[in-house]
Image (cartoon, rainbow, N blue to C red):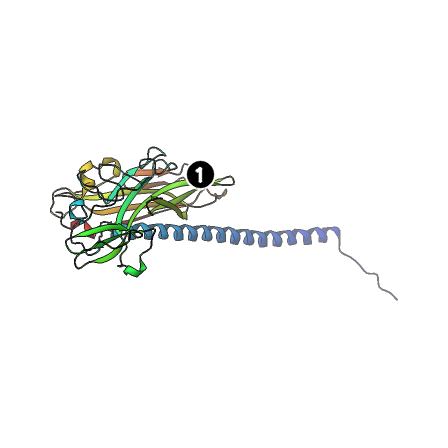
């Protein structure tokens, strides 16, 4: 005799569906939470990587600012056994009378470091036409830390042949290397750093740019270094009394003209560097209401959807104490 099979009641089905929905909801909640955490971790990791890379590049240049190989003093036109090359066409020329790529005779101290807070997209004598307002631009002049063999000289680069007392700057394709007693050859560099904005689709992405001195026909070659660098600010530690002690940290806008000359009793002994890094893409689930303090200036995120990290460091300037003839 067959037994009558009984199914689930309507109430049992509803209870089972409800339990299933609760379980599915819990799984989805965990999944969404893990995905959000992964995205946040990835974004913060990207910010950390970009910021550290930018700080490392700028620190390396600042540490070696005013380094001229074996020369025991600051670089000045009076030391050159041959005239310095003329500043190339289209050169990035900063403030002051002698602030191009090369020292020029009879026009004041040669500035190997100079900065300004951007108040116009066109800066450095028209060399740059897309700078971000309220960030800082900086010029740094130096040589590469390792000497160069004469056989390795490249035609599109400038070099300095420097001894203890004298030096000569020359272009790699100029032919013979100028003679300097007990000297070595070093690659001569003039770097410019600034921030511009690139539009990619609907997003505007801040980018750290570097200008590098090239040959006479193309003074500066600009390349993108790293995305997401939104603001850079410098505070210069100045010794105004000649005793080797920093009297104040001063923003570019407040620097007196003679402070940039690194001459007599006024020296720039250190630089406080602030780098504000922003995520490339916004996170619509995140509101940034933070105010980022960079020395004497601040940046207000104003409730936008970008994550940011502020990096800061202080860089000493070991070459600032070289004697001046």
Q: Which residue is rendered at x = 58% and y = 52% of the image?
A: 28
Relative to 300, does residue 163 appear above or below in the rendering?
Answer: below
Q: Residue furthest top?
A: 120
In the figure, residue 239 lies in which quadrant?
A: top left
Relative to 206, does residue 60 appear above or below in the rendering?
Answer: below
| Left or right of 46 in this view: 151 | left
| Left or right of 46 in this view: 258 | left
Q: Nearer the viewer, residue 9 or 149?
A: 149
Near mark 1 (Cα within 10 A), the count class, few <14, some 14-19 or many ≥20, is some
Q: Position of residue 206 (x, y in %)?
A: 41, 42
Q: Residue furthest front?
A: 175
- Image quadrant in which the N terminus is located: bottom right
Q: Nearer the viewer, residue 154 or 315?
A: 154
Q: Residue furthest right?
A: 1
Provide the secondary structure element on which disc 1 rests. loop
Q: Position of residue 140 (x, y in %)?
A: 27, 46
Mark yes or no: residue 95 visible.
Answer: yes
Q: Nearer the viewer, residue 134 or 33?
A: 134
Q: How many marks?
A: 1
Q: Nearer the viewer, residue 224 or 255?
A: 224
| Left or right of 70 in this view: 41 | right
Q: Name the residue tied to disc 1.
A: 304
Q: Which residue is rendered at x = 39% and y = 47% of the image?
A: 223
In the figure, residue 233 lies in which quadrant?
A: top left
Q: Which residue is rendered at x = 34% and y = 33% of the image?
A: 120
Mark yes or no: residue 256 visible.
Answer: no
Q: Position of residue 247 (x, y in %)?
A: 16, 43
Q: Position of residue 15 (x, y in %)?
A: 68, 52
Q: Residue furthest bottom?
A: 1
């Amino acid at each position: 005799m067959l037994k009558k099979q009984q199914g689930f009641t309507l109430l049992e089905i509803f209870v089972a569906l409800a339990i299933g929905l609760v379980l599915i909801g819990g799984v989805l909640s965990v999944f969404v939470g893990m995905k959000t955490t992964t995205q946040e971790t990835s974004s913060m990791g990207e910010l950390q990587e970009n910021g550290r890379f930018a700080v490392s590049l700028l620190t390396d240049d600042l540490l070696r600012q005013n380094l001229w190989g074996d020369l025991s003093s600051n670089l000045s036109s009076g030391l050159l056994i041959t005239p310095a090359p003329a500043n190339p066409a289209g050169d990035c020329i900063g403030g002051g009378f002698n602030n191009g790529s090369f020292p020029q005779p009879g026009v004041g101290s040669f500035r190997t470091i100079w900065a300004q807070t951007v108040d116009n997209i066109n800066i450095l004598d028209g060399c740059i036409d897309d700078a971000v307002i309220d960030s800082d631009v900086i010029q740094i002049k130096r040589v590469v830390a390792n000497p160069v063999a004469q056989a390795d000289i490249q035609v599109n680069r400038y070099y300095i042949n420097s001894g203890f007392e004298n030096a000569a700057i020359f272009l790699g394709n100029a032919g013979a290397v100028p003679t300097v007693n007990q000297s070595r050859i070093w690659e001569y560099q003039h770097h410019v750093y600034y921030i511009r904005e690139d539009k990619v689709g609907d997003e505007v992405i801040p980018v750290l740019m570097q200008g590098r001195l090239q040959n006479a026909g193309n003074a500066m070659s600009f390349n993108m270094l790293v995305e997401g660098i939104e603001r850079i600010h410098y505070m210069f530690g100045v010794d105004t009394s000649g005793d080797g002690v920093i009297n104040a940290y001063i923003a570019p806008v407040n620097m007196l003209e003679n402070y940039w000359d690194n001459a007599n009793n006024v020296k720039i002994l250190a630089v406080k560097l602030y780098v504000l890094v922003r995520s490339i893409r916004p996170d619509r689930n995140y509101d940034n209401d933070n105010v980022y303090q960079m020395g004497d200036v601040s940046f207000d995120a104003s409730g936008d959807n970008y994550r940011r990290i502020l990096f800061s460091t202080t860089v000493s300037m070991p070459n600032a104490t070289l004697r001046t003839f």
